[in-house]
Image (cartoon, coloured by chain):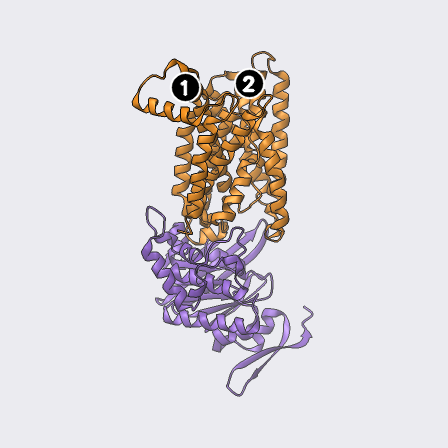
Amino acid sequence: MIEHEILNVENLNFSYSDRRILNRISFSVKRGEICGLLGPNGCGKTTLLKCINRILDIESGIIRINGRDISNLSRSEIAGLIAVVPQELHVAFSFSVIQMVLMGGTVRYGFSGIPGRKDYTLACEILEELNIDHLASRRYNELSGGEKQIVLIARALFQRSEIMLLDEPTSHLDFKRQHLIMEMIKKITKERGLTTLITLHDPNTAGRYCNRLTMLNRGCVCHHGSRDNIFHAESLESTYDMKINIEQTESGRSVVYPAFELNKK
Amino acid sequence: MKKNLPFLIIILLLTAGILFALTAGQFHIRLDTLLDLLILKLSGKTPGEEIATQAMVLWSVRLPRVLMAILAGSALSVSGVVFQGIMRNPLVAPSFLGVTHGAVFGASIAIIFFSTAAFSIEVSAFLWAIAAVAAVYLIGGRGINTLTTLVIAGVIVSTFFQAAGSLLKYIADPYEQLPTIVFWMMGGMNNIIWNHVIRASAIISAGVTVIYLLRWKLNLMALGDEEALSMGVNVKYLRAILMLFATLLAAASSSSCGIIMWVDLIVAHISRAIVGADHKRLIPFSALLGGFFLLMTDTIVRSIPGGEIPISIITSFIGAPLLGYLLMKQKKQWRE
């Protein structure tokens, strides 16, 4: 493993019952990078995130964080290394926003397991940093989709883990909020020296915000590398099984759009 | 201050409720006599002949019954709060998850096959209550729509234990064993003595203390297993401990008072609406409200002219329409 690689996945296999979902997955992410996981529905993106966070037990392979095999780590040690922002969180009983954020720090609360006054102050500071301090006493269930997503990001930040896993954090948001959230993720990844692994549906969003991409198809990694090296029509076509055009805008950005000829294979 | 107002109100209500319950009933004790008896007791003096009967009723019959009603109401309500939290479901409660019927079945088995000693009845009640809740969880905890499947699994397991309980009634000795089993199935506090109160208070205070110590992690459990795992909670271990102690609370109540339906579900629900979802406030508030609710219900059933009626009749008369009202009011939230 190269020294500055924080996350390294080697030959990971995972099956639900007899059905193989992830097949010989290998890739790595360097410290400070935003790595986008791209691929069609059902290709195993979310399953891969759950395997990395050890929510699901892998069949074989190794997942290393800072060189340590996570299968040897306790639940709280993993929580100290990895924070998760779920796609959408339905909560049966509505907690306040500040409580939701404080839950992120549970592994640090020691023997009593209860947050102290200092933790409240720190959680409030994170809400301020993300400009949602006015929501602190609001009920989580009463918030809009975008606000909920920022609260979950605040919770992940409060967890103070080195790696942040985000599962399609923008899939329920409108165009403007998608980009506000992605800008926020980019900013905090840079400022806090985090490493972010994010599953995304839209290749344009991935191309704009991620500096590393891992493309999955049918449970296998079909392309992995820096955005500049692999963000081209051929790799996206083989990932999504469709014809894709890429055009350069005047500002030099690549814009992906379908060629409307669906690949028959 | 505003935040603590619900606690202040429920403490005042409970205090007033205790005074009312100690004085009210078929044998009325005047408030001034009650105070005299209390002063005499505190000063260690023996009451005079004119109030000797009142003293006997108060210290030997009414006070243990009042305390048991508060304890059982608190235990059932906290148990309801915990089950709702770990199953993330506002419709579950021990009495609807087969815990209560499992406990009664266990008690009936002990009465028929072992002995009528309180200890063997309580242990058997507890073990069968655990078996019932484990069965519900295995049957209903894995479906796509766990809200519905858990409730259905609760109906299945409750029905099974009800049928098994009826079978035991059928084979029980009609003179020795049957009356004890029937008492258990009807629920009530007319046989409560100090021994019950002492035993139940030890179990219930231990159970509530352990659950209260785990209040923050219970908050995380209420978000979902994956969420709790991601934030470092050992979900399997914590759920097992919480379910064990919540079942212990429900079984401790059932082993002294028999089946009491609805208190767990309704009080947990109302408490959540009043003080919110944080278990730091929810656990103590539901304990106080549950104690008050069952105390008042028990006072009603023993004060009605024409003899005492089983307590579950009143709790069901209050609980069922109230749940119907809440269901209509919160349709949207429960659909999720």
| Secondary structure category for the residue under label 2 | helix
Residue A180 position within the rendered picture, expressed as x and y whole percent measured from the top left: 49, 72
Residue A50 position within the rendered picture, expressed as x and y whole percent measured from the top left: 50, 56
Q: Quadrant of residue A258?
A: bottom right
Q: Residue furthest top?
A: B175
> Which tint is chain A?
purple
Instruction: Compare residues A232 and B1 and report the one nearer the observer.
Output: B1
Quarter of the image with the N terminus of chain A is: bottom left
Residue B8 position within the rendered picture, expressed as x and y whole percent measured from the top left: 42, 44
Which mark sits nearer the N-terminus, 2 or 1?
Answer: 1
| Neighbours of disc 2 within 10 Å: few (<14), some (14-19), many (20+) | some
Q: Which mark is residue B210?
A: none
Q: Residue furthest left?
A: B43
The residue that mark 1 highlights is B55
| Secondary structure category for the residue under label 1 | helix
Q: CA distance from mark 2 to mark 1?
A: 28 Å
Residue type for callout 2: Thr
